[in-house]
Amino acid sequence: MSIFRVYVDGALFYHPNLSKLAITQARVSEDAANIDSLKLSAPFNHPYIDSIRPMASIIVCKKGENVVFEGRALDNGSDFYNTHTWTCESALAYLKDTMQPPFSYKGPLKGLFEQFISVHNKSVEDQKKFKVGNVTVTDNNNYVSYSSSDFTMTMDAIKNKLINTHGGYLQVRYESDGKYLDYLSDFKTKSMQTVEFGKNITDVKITRDHTERVTVLIPLGAKKTVTDENGNETQSEDRVDITSVNGGKNYIYDDAAVKEIGWIWKSEVWDDVTLPGNLLKKAKSRLSDLVNGVTSIQLSIVDESDNGADIGDIRARMYVECISKPHGINGTYLCVNRTRDYLNPSGNTITIGASGVTLSASTVKQDKNIAAIEDDLLGKTYKIETISGEIDTINAQKMYRTELVVDGVNIFKNKGQASTMRCKVYSWDKDITDTLDAECFVWHRKSSDEEADIEWDKNHIGKKQITITTEDVYDNASFYCEINL
């Protein structure tokens, strides 16, 4: 089992086998689209409590030989018991320390990224420097043209000129020869673990933010070039729009969404799009996401690597196979957030999501209705879209969703335990469970004994709630309810 340790300026600050170097909290929050953070706490009698100098000390957390966090403390506070707590930001925040001077750049996209990092490295000490790593984000023409007349923070310059226009993620990668900064269109790592209801999922929270919904979109493309009488080209403030390919209108709208929630307008800019037809295609794809709002799915999990399994951690910026039939989750998803307390793993969570995941009876019936996802955030965290499966028939149906309520424990650890499961059925946001006959509710069990599962299923038809005991679980089993409407 890999041991978790904390170092401050290269000196050991925490080791689980050294009582004098005890700490009370080491909680790392990873964010695929932002800067990671660490919450570190130590008791008043820690011998090196004064060694952490905010904004100066380098704090490194390792699990085994892998760096799981590197950064600096932002503050230093204490509570009633004089326990000291530091809020720390990861090494990616070093990009906030430098400024990009006014510039004009024309050339490959990778070259602009290299220019930003080169300017940054010339302005900071060695510990804050990055080597340019993998750059997998591309431009259709392999040519970008950007300029700025202002001094801009390096992080803002990268976001404004690269991420907001071409998408992608920044990732700090640690190798034996230094610290690399990758600019990736997508992540290629997949966890060896499977997150599954009834196995290592302890809670599921699905959130849809309706305040982010949009029904009308005005798309704008690159700035137009104007040629004067001498043949000189200059860039105007006017941008490419879709009026020439959209019946004279510079906007598109979703008719069904407008009827539901009214006219809610938004404008977005694609600086690299020069053709109205291409701009219209991008706008239609983007609007299909905006009408749904922002959906995030948070799973509280038991990471098997915490229990000594040599299987590798689940981290943000990797894909994870997640299965929870009661919630319509079945596929491989990008882990966009990961919260991990290395001293108390019971509260660990991951956040996934799927724009277009339909929590209806239809999705519960399908084993593999979502096989994979492709990230297309365009600056919006937690936005993901399904890219496989025939979901047209699902979208055409009346929207139903189910909610499984468990009274008791989700994971049985001792004999004699029991939990009650109830299945609620919603039509949109209205609870219609009481209006349905009990015969509509068909419970299923999935375990290693298929024949026993078939027999178990026969005895659990026509019940709105059931009681699960340790005798029902054996070694490992998951349960879900199928609703026949």
Image (cartoon, rainbow, N blue to C red):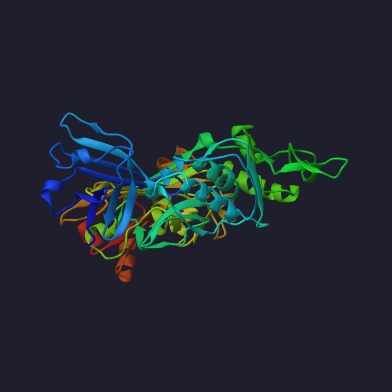
> Is residue 198 at least partly visible in the picture?
no
Q: Residue at x 74, y 49 (%)?
A: 275
> Is residue 228 at least partly visible in the picture?
yes
Q: Quadrant of the N terminus?
A: bottom left
Instruction: Name the foreground residue: 102 vs 478.
Output: 102
Give the image quarter of residue 194. bottom left
Return the residue found at the far top. 80
Where's residue 146, x and y in %? 64, 45
Q: Is residue 377 left or right of residue 241?
A: left
Q: Height in image: 142 above or below 151? A: below
Q: Is residue 284 left or right of residue 327?
A: right
Instruction: Name the foreground residue: 243 vs 269.
Output: 269
Q: Height in image: 394 above or below 447? A: above
Q: Residue at x 33, y 49 (%)?
A: 70
Where's residue 417, x and y in %? 18, 53
Count the labels in the image.
0
Give the image quarter of residue 310. bottom left
Q: Residue at x 13, y 52 (%)?
A: 18
Where's residue 282, x and y in %? 66, 49
Where's residue 368, x and y in %? 47, 62
Instruction: Name the foreground residue: 11 vs 185.
Output: 11
Q: Residue at x 33, y 36 (%)?
A: 74
Instruction: Name the foreground residue: 31 vs 418.
Output: 31
Q: Height in image: 325 above or below 154? A: below
Q: Height in image: 271 above or below 181? A: above
